[in-house]
Image (cartoon, grey):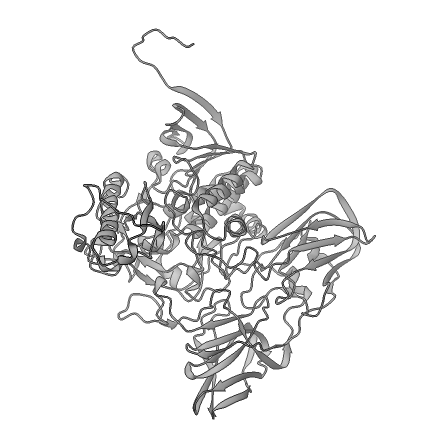
């Protein structure tokens, strides 16, 4: 029994602790940062004010995770973010292809608690901090857990604010902005005026389900009574649920930090009013057996404070794809602004404009310009309101969290500040991010410790010499213009395809390429050919005179014609895609981006793939084989297709493909890194979408590695991840390694992007 005498006042239980790095905010950004830092040997305290991790992607909010892939709705091919966020997405699709938000919670929680270097504090909110005003550094944060009535004081030399609203940055006095910059300040032509609004609002979602019997609904008294107050009320229907209702937004005219509870109540009012409309208006008889299964209890936030670093990312950097010397990540979501009045606005729910490819984000955006030991990550990084409209999405933010974590590990290693990491240790920062699987656009990487770089020979039992893809029984009408992407360097080979005309008609074929080889927007037309076809099947031979002096993708483009079917193949190859000039209204893709006025964005067409189980390649044969799938690719710097496949691919007929790496003299090896093709073009949304596979068809599932004594020194089984490391208990000495690669998918040749040895 506990008994205490009455007292005037008591203090809560207090626990004091120390860490190398304190991360405030357990959303996807903070989670990825914590995992990365912990794996680098940094002692991390992760403070999260909610009962689960994930923030907007958690079961509390249920927003899908997206980034540069943009629902496969833009021209950013093979653009899914790498590193820890990629690992999380692949693990989720392996376990949870149906997108259950509760299962996704467990994936995040498991990843964190498996790291012994992480101390996780859930339900714990930071409310104060200590600061050394002479050095402009934070020394400790104070937080309170509502569930165990405990106060925590955590000291550290380094802090990361990934809290969304920037509570640590705000309390510490870090410079920040809130609202929209004027067009004049940075010359951003897309900058909104006050009539449109200067802040994006919050959203709240609901789930419904059919329970097989009639269900009545009596709305709460606070539900919106007149649904016509919402100009887009006719958009509500019984089929949409969850974050397909992203446009159910409010709060952009309010203080999106301090008015959050007020905004939440307005969103509840709208949600229950909308459901009352669906159930009781009589307009939706199909809703009779439907019940309201779940409504969010906290709103998903889009925007509040943005903190100033040593560089402020701008609209022009995104559109022009600025090359930065200190690139540590990339983005590719559209410039995506929303009217501040949200669901009460009579304007479109969003105003999206895409760039022609992915853009770089410099390290200088990820730390405070005036608080010397504060990293900033997530949607609060150093960007203008317009640039933030793209960088704010979760996969982009999570990748930035990993960049911060690697920088924190270097700051610990060299006992320096976040700024000094960029000034003195930038190449090491970029190298470690690259080793972790991140793509750094327009950035050269040198890895002097990788023994594969010193190999005298990299050979394989076979390499794909792409001469053809055999036809299948699948023929489809050219309803939308369709293009086969082919990697080319040198003379463009002639291409033969098979078509069937249902009426006398003309087939028009264009050979295109991108004006920038690292993009996949076919904005340059090299040649055009036309063919007069009679009814029936035809073999079409396309002879080209074009020369690709540098490696790049050719778009063999068949212009839409409803009177023509074209033959497809069931074979899939790493680095090959078929794309369509179709539409994807979910990301403002209407086939062509064509602004009606000068808002500082480009005009171009969208050519995007289909999702599997569609997404076949065209059937074709070539006059000369494409030989860009050689084993030498295993030591190049890219872990994904860009201007070339960047992969070794085995021949389809090689039943047991083997790669051999030879050195002139024996080398000592303790660690082997392997990068697999997990289809970086697939966005892998964690909720709403149902995915057809749990393992990507391009992904090699089994690896066996032998030394020069024919001894097995490492194995990987049942792989579904992009990056795997084999750490040996003792170093081995060998003149060569033989790597046996297995991909059980009969329609896909075995492939790898990289093998690295240390």
Which residue appears farthest toward the front when viewing the image?
A: 213
* Image height of 325 relative to 570, above or below: above
Q: How many numbered discs?
A: 0
**Considering only vertical position in the picture, is 271 above or below 602?**
above
Report the quarter where the N terminus lies. top left
Q: 485 or 160: nearer the eye?
A: 485
| Residue 593 horizontal/vertical position (percent) | 35, 70
Quadrant of residue 570 within the rendered picture: bottom right
Q: Residue at x 23, y 49 (%)?
A: 276
Look at the picture and state if 740 lies above or below 20: below
Q: Is residue 205 visible?
A: no
Please state the horizontal and vertical placement of residue 542, each as a whole percent of the image: 54, 86
Figure quadrant of residue 30: top left
Residue 264, image x and y in percent?
A: 26, 42
Q: Is residue 91 left or right of residue 379?
A: right
Q: Outermost residue, top direction?
A: 5
């Amino acid at each position: 029994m506990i008994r205490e005498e009455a007292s005037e006042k008591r203090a809560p239980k207090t626990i004091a602790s120390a860490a190398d790095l304190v991360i405030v905010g357990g959303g996807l950004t903070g989670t990825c940062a914590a995992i990365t830092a912990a794996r680098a040997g940094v002692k991390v305290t992760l403070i999260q004010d909610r009962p689960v991790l994930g923030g907007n992607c958690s079961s509390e909010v249920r927003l899908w995770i997206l980034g540069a892939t943009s629902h496969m709705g833009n021209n950013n091919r093979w653009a899914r973010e790498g590193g820890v966020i990629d690992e999380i997405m692949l693990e989720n699709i392996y376990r949870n292809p149906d997108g259950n938000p509760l299962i996704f919670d467990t994936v995040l929680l498991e990843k964190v608690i498996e790291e012994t270097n992480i101390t996780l504090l859930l339900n714990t909110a930071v409310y104060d901090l200590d600061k050394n005003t002479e050095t402009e550094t934070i020394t400790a944060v104070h937080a309170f857990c509502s569930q165990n009535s405990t106060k925590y004081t955590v000291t550290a030399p380094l802090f990361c604010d990934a809290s969304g609203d920037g509570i640590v940055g705000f309390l510490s006095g870090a410079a920040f902005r809130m609202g929209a910059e004027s067009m004049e300040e940075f010359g951003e032509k897309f900058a909104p005026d006050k009539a449109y609004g200067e802040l994006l609002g919050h959203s709240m979602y609901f789930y419904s389900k059919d329970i097989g019997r009639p269900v009545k609904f009596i709305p709460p008294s606070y539900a919106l009574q007149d649904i016509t107050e919402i100009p887009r009320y006719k958009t509500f229907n019984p089929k949409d649920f969850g974050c397909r209702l992203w446009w159910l937004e409010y709060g952009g005219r309010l203080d999106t930090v301090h008015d959050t509870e007020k905004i939440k109540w307005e969103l509840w009012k709208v949600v229950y009013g909308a459901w009352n409309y669906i159930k009781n208006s009589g307009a939706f008889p199909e809703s009779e057996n439907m019940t309201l299964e779940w409504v969010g209890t906290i709103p998903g936030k889009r925007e509040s404070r943005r903190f100033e670093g040593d560089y402020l990312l701008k609209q022009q950097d995104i559109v022009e794809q600025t090359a930065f010397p200190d690139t540590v990540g990339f983005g590719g979501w559209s410039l995506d602004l929303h009217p501040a009045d949200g669901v009460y606005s009579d304007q479109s729910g969003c105003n999206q404009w895409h760039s022609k490819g992915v853009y770089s984000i410099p390290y200088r955006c990820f730390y405070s310009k005036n608080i010397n030991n504060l990293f900033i990550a997530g949607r609060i990084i150093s960007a203008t309101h317009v640039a933030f409209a793209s960088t704010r999405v979760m996969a982009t933010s999570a990748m930035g969290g990993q960049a911060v974590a690697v920088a924190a590990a270097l700051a610990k290693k060299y006992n320096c500040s976040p700024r000094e990491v960029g000034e003195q240790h930038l190449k090491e920062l970029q190298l470690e991010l690259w080793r972790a699987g991140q793509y750094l656009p327009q950035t050269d990487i040198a890895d002097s410790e990788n023994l594969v770089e010193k190999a005298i020979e990299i050979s394989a039992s076979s390499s794909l010499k792409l001469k053809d893809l055999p036809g299948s029984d699948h023929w489809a009408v050219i309803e939308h213009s369709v293009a086969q992407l082919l990697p080319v360097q040198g003379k463009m080979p002639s291409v033969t395809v098979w078509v069937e005309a249902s009426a006398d008609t003309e087939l028009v074929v264009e050979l295109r390429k991108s004006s920038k080889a690292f993009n996949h927007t076919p904005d340059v037309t090299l040649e055009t050919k036309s063919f007069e076809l009679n009814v029936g099947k035809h073999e079409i031979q396309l002879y080209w005179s074009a020369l690709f002096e540098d490696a790049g993708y050719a778009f063999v483009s068949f212009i839409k014609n409803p009177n023509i079917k074209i033959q497809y193949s069931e074979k899939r190859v790493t680095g090959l895609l078929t794309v369509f000039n179709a539409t994807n209204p979910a990301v403002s893709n209407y086939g062509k981006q064509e602004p009606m006025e000068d808002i500082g964005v480009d005009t171009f067409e969208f050519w995007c793939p289909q999702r599997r189980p569609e997404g076949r390649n065209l059937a074709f044969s070539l006059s000369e084989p494409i030989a860009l799938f050689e084993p030498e690719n295993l030591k190049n710097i890219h872990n994904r297709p860009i201007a070339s496949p960047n992969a070794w691919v085995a021949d389809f007929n090689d039943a047991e493909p083997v790669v051999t790496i030879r050195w002139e003299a024996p080398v000592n090896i303790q660690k082997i890194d392997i990068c697999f093709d997990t289809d970086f073009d697939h966005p892998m949304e964690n909720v709403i979408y149902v995915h057809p596979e749990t393992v990507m068809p391009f992904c090699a599932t089994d690896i066996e590695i032998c030394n020069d004594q024919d001894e097995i020194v490492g194995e990987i089984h049942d792989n579904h991840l992009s990056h795997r490391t084999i750490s040996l208990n003792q170093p081995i000495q060998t003149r060569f390694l033989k790597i046996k690669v297995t991909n059980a998918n009969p329609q896909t040749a075995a492939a790898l992007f990289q093998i690295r040895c240390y």
